[in-house]
Image (cartoon, rainbow, N blue to C red):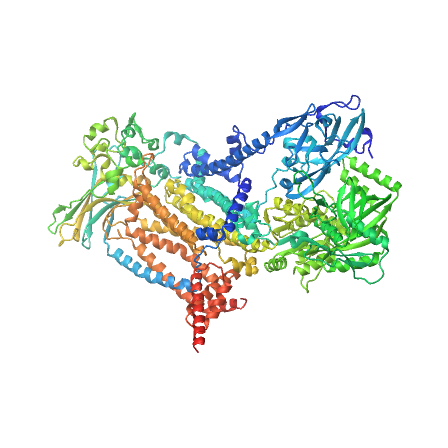
Amino acid sequence: MMASSYNAKEEDGHPSGASNHGGAGATKSRKPDNTAFKQQRLPAWQPILTAGTVLPAFFVIGLIFIPIGIGLYVTSNNIKEFEIDYTGVEISSPCYSCAKNFSSNNTTPCLCFVEFTLEQPFESNVFMYYGLSNFYQNHRRYVKSRDDRQLNGDLSALTEPSKECEPYRKSNGLPIAPCGAIANSLFNDTLELYHIDANGSRNIIPLVKKGIAWWTDKHVKFRNPGGNSNLSAVFHDTTKPENWRKPVYELDTSDPDNNGFINEDFIVWMRTAALPTFRKLYRIIQKKSSTTPTLPSGRYILNITYNYPVLSFDGRKRMILSTISWMGGKNPFLGIAYITVGSICFFLGVVLLIIHHKYDTRNNSSADIPN
Amino acid sequence: KSCSHFKCVGEEDWVDSRTIYIGHKQPPPGTEAFIQQRFPDNRIVSSKYTFWNFIPKNMFEQFRRVANFYFLIIFLVQLIIDTPTSPITSGLPLFFVITVTAIKQGYEDWLRHKADNAVNQCPVHVVQHGKVVRKQSRKIRVGDIVCVKENESFPCDLILLSSSRDEGTCYVTTASLDGESSHKTYFAVQDTKAYNTEKEVDSIHATIECEQPQPDLYKFVGRINIYMDNEPVARPLGSENLLLRGATLKNTEYIYAVAIYTGMETKMALNYQSKSQKRSAVEKSMNAYLVVYLCILISKALINTVLKYVWQADPNRDEPWYNQRTETERQRHVLIRAFTDFLAFMVLFNYIIPVSMYVTVEMQKFLGSYFIMWDDEMLDEELGERAVVNTSDLNEELGQVEYVFTDKTGTLTENNMEFIECCVDGHVYVPHAICNGQVMRGAAGMDMIDTSPGPEARHEELFFRALCLCHTVQVKEEETVDGIKHGIHQGKSTSFYISSSPDEVALVEGMKRLGFTYLRLKDSHMEILNREDEIERFELLEVLTFDSVRRRMSVIVRATGELFLFCKGADSSIFPRIISGKVDQVRARVENNAVEGLRTLCVAYRPLSPEQYEEVCHLLSGAKLALQDRDKRLAEAYELIEKDLILLGATAVEDRLQEKAADTIESLHKAGMKVWVLTGDKMETAAATCYASKLFRRNTQILELTTKRTEEQSLHDVLFDLSRTVLRHHGGMTRDTFSGCRRAMLSNGAAAESSGADILRHLTGIVKLIKASKEHPITLAVGDGANDVSMILEAHVGIGIMGKEGRQAARNSDYAIPKFKHLKKMLLVHGHYYYIRISELVQYFFYKNVCFIFPQFLYQFFCGFSQQPLYDTAYLTLYNISFTSLPILLYSLIEQHINMDILKKDPSLYKDIAKNSLLRWPIFIYWTILGVYDAIVMFFGAYFLFDNTTFTSNGQMFGNWTFGTLVFTVLVFTVTFKLALDTHYWTWINHFVIWGSLIFFVVFSLLWGGIIWPFLNYQRMYYVFMQMLSSGPAWLSIILLITAGLLPDVVKKVIWRALWPTTTERIQSVNFSVCLQCSFTSNSNVSHSLCLCCHSSIKDSNHKSSVWFNMMILQAQHHARCLESSRISL
């Protein structure tokens, strides 16, 4: 492929060489780097990895990583997390009948209540997640089954959704909005949390449904066609996804800024999870005052409107309550990994120290002789 | 002298011949049927493409390469079936590569078109109807009579009919064909040389019969039939009558000649054909690795396909309610689905064999070869020549050479011959005034060292005359000034001798110093100025030219009625033909001289009676007129003529070793190379040269291959067991050795060439034999002459020396260097560097793509084998093109693991990379395992970080694209840092490129995720990268995973270096520690001398510490000054 251009190359090489010589001092002082480059004599730093040079680095890494790891581990351990599976697989579980009798044609929602006890109070903001298992949101057919143009408020894409949405693209000749498998399978259980007082009365815990989606998603990536007002008119020529009970413009009728495509529950769902077991942020329980914990220890009831079938694919549904630190939720992995790598580095440092003392000096002296 | 038209020898064998009617005139009726053959016009087409066929033809040629074809297939699969990645990811790089190549080739072809047009349209003079007409060059047809003026070049291959010179000769330089700038003499056909005006020449009535064109520049046989008075006269035509296209007319006012080969049939055009492609060992390893990776790719795809169908046997997994197939998909047959799934997996993993590797390797080779051409140390000041790279494909092969075959004359030696002595019948004559090969004026006397009474006066006379006559030397006259030619006047002019053989020049000049000056050849008479300042004239009747099989040449001259045959040649070819003379004395002297490393020739004569001469003439003309097997017939004729010789004496010519030749050979030896000197010299001469060039040591066991020992088995053993063997071709045993070699070759299963005891083939045979031996060693051939070309072409690497024997070798070689000594730097420094560089390039490329693709493979286990790509399309496309391409390209261009001065000083370092040691399977497997390890660290690191939890401080969750981006970020950094750890030579460019490409990655990611790109159908990457960076644990995990990924490699390197260091590593650390020691002890006075020593030992090496060294020198100077001043004050 390159074989035919040698003549040109040859000609290139000669004049440049000649100029280097003819010009002598003048060209050299003007372009010292160029000649040094051509002669492969550019000034260079020539590091060599030897036990001696690497040693300090290993100790330093060890000394830095181990404290970081311990810090991460402690932080992770201080995070409080409570998880409850409400799928209803066992007969004893409260949602068993809902799970068993599920059919998509049911018009009346099935309700169930799960009681649980928090042993420790949850200070600061508490984040409520729903978790799904064995749900392949990262399946290729699923991941691509969406139309970002449509979700961005593109009117043409609203009436003519992308082919990628098949087979959730059109229904009875009308375009589906939002189209695609992801939107169609929107998680639609409703979770409510009640605290049971010492005197046995139920107090509903206010759940904040805003701030659960990425700010950029909510404000830039997802947009309602034609603004947020009068959504029903805009979506007039479209139909709701088959599995939905209500059309997209009725997702949150109470708040026009949380309705339609910019409904945060919807946006959260549309960000496909990386792994088949995942959790998604559902609600935030905000701290009310600095004196009382957000969720004091005690008994709680989770009120579930059971709409979402998972048993058909061996899935599980969970509700998770978690506090958050600067490093996010409970995850001991990072701390342990840091401690491990730091320790290994430290250990290797010791090993290398021994090797260095035993061998490097010997090698150097023996290698000096031929020189 | 002539033969009748119908009785010429060999006529019955004319199969491949053509008949040319000069001036398109029909032959007289009755002699022959007039068949006008069709010949191409004189258009030269060196371009490959036309405007119309460029795109299809170029595409076809490009996709014929396996790699391109593979990527095309992948691309087409992506277009046809529903694949995980968009066709852009493989289409764009492929399109880029194809386009760049096409543009380059198109441009080159356009240049060729331009050059062709210039040549084809340049005006030429053609004789038509007795008048000279101007025509475009391309319109010349076979049979046209062309008129060429001085300094014009010939438009096609011509047969010289007549010239402006009376004797019908013309001078030609073939510099543009074979680089020989000397003027060669060509001869007109004797019967037409008188026709030297356009009218006369147009009246010639003749036909030419000659062979069909063949590419050999130096061979031509033909015959001209001239119809004078309707009686045909046939004359032989040889290469001395043939003017080649491309050659230039010199020192001759004009010539008339007839076109016989035109256009693409000219010998020059036939020589355009490209040489066979050589492939380097690295390329072979690379191809082997590719096959391995292809297997890995296919098995990965197969495993995933099988697992997919096992996994989704449960319909709720295959098609859960939330993720249904389309109706058309459902109806597809399961086998078709499985096959498309397999293809989709192939597409998903195809990046493991990247397009960019080929591009990078080619760029590395192409750009890297500039360093050879730029190298000032390989610049020859005298010649003003630099090293030339003809094939950049073999750069790294220079670092793998195991056998060096070198020609002796002109390669090891200067080829600057100097006449030392001659001996006539055992009496030695030495010209006493020798001053660097130049004759001192007025000192042309002679000394007789031998005090014994002179030899038979007749022999002495004959000897000197023989040497003055038996040669093909030309006298170069002074350039014409105002049309007046200055000849030689009584030997006082500044004329000099030119010959294709420097030996002959040395001999003729030696004779001049001994009192016999050869003046010129005029009108077939050679003129000699003898000691008494008389001019003697000899009629030159025949020249039996030199060839390398006979190894002798002869002339037949007539002097005042007497006829002599003078013969000169190698002793082995002369002695068997001697019938009288003082053979023993001469032989003793010859052998004595040979031991001293002098080149010897023997001279003999044979008086011919007129009858004998008649017979000789008959033999010669018969052979010369043959069209078929002319060479063989000529050889037979020569054999018969050169017999019954009377020995006159011998000459000795010295050919000095080239400067630093001995040093170079010693270095090559130390580098573990086996150096073979192939020469046609006498055994003793060769041995003496070898001792001088340190090829032989005193204790070297010399094994002589003689006729008796060329038994098949012994030859076989000898060739492979003895490393320091010099094979000498003793003239007499050539044939036997060759057949021995051939048999050995056959036993090795190598293809045997057609026989022929030609020494060229012989050299080639040896090279071939070594190449085909069990270990398949890498061979290198060095030579300077046309006779070395076949050897150069046969060896793995062919190196030509730009010597005095023309440019043939340099043109046909892969690399051309000005002097033999440059071979040292070429191999030890450039070869070593290129090998280190390209092996790292190859290994690294596979490594980084394993790192790249293996996480995708792992991800399939977590996404239901759905071929979901882990990374975004942009990352998939740009990973190999821009994020990780430049650092490795730069590394492969300028990496220097050891300073070049040390490489030169310590040739044994070359052994460290011998036998393709950096591309062996264990190392390849190590790299691959390292890649897999890194991939596992990266993937599972991210996996555990993402596992069912969040790592943002606002509780929000990340999706699959953040997961992929995290892995990808770690990947880019790990892979780049890995290269940074391997870099031993950090110039500012390295810093710029390595950090620059990382910064580019970050900037690109920010940009790619920062905007809703209107032309994209999906916005999956929107703010993904920034959101990731806003999370502390993401940073921490990136740092952790990079550290964990690099750790094992660093540890392995350090421990290996400490426990089992290679020579290279030892030298590296010695250097390193010396510098450190120096810097640490720089305060004490004692260390100054030591440090200055260090400095001188690694002088010119571009340590960063060189600044420090300079300071040291200043400091030392300062101290010295202080000392001095203190002494003064005392």
Q: Quadrant of the N terminus of chain B?
A: top right
Horizontal and vertical percent for residue A340?
35, 59
User: Who is closer to the viewer here, B57 or B511?
Assistant: B511
Residue drawn where x is 43% and y is 33% of the image: B79
Residue drawn where x is 63% and y is 59% of the image: B662
User: Who is closer to the viewer here, B1031 or B498?
Assistant: B498
Q: Is residue B242 left or right of residue B302?
A: right
Q: Is residue B697 left or right of residue B576?
A: left
Horizontal and vertical percent for residue B272?
61, 37
Horizontal and vertical percent for residue A300?
17, 49
Residue drawn where x is 76% and y is 60% of the image: B592
Q: Among all residues in the image, which is located at the extreme top?
A: B29
Question: Is residue B516 positioned above or below B62 on the image?
Answer: below
Instruction: Let me know if residue A314 appears in the view.
Output: no
Q: Quadrant of the C terminus of chain B?
A: bottom left
Horizontal and vertical percent for residue B720?
67, 55
Residue drawn where x is 13% and y is 54% of the image: A291
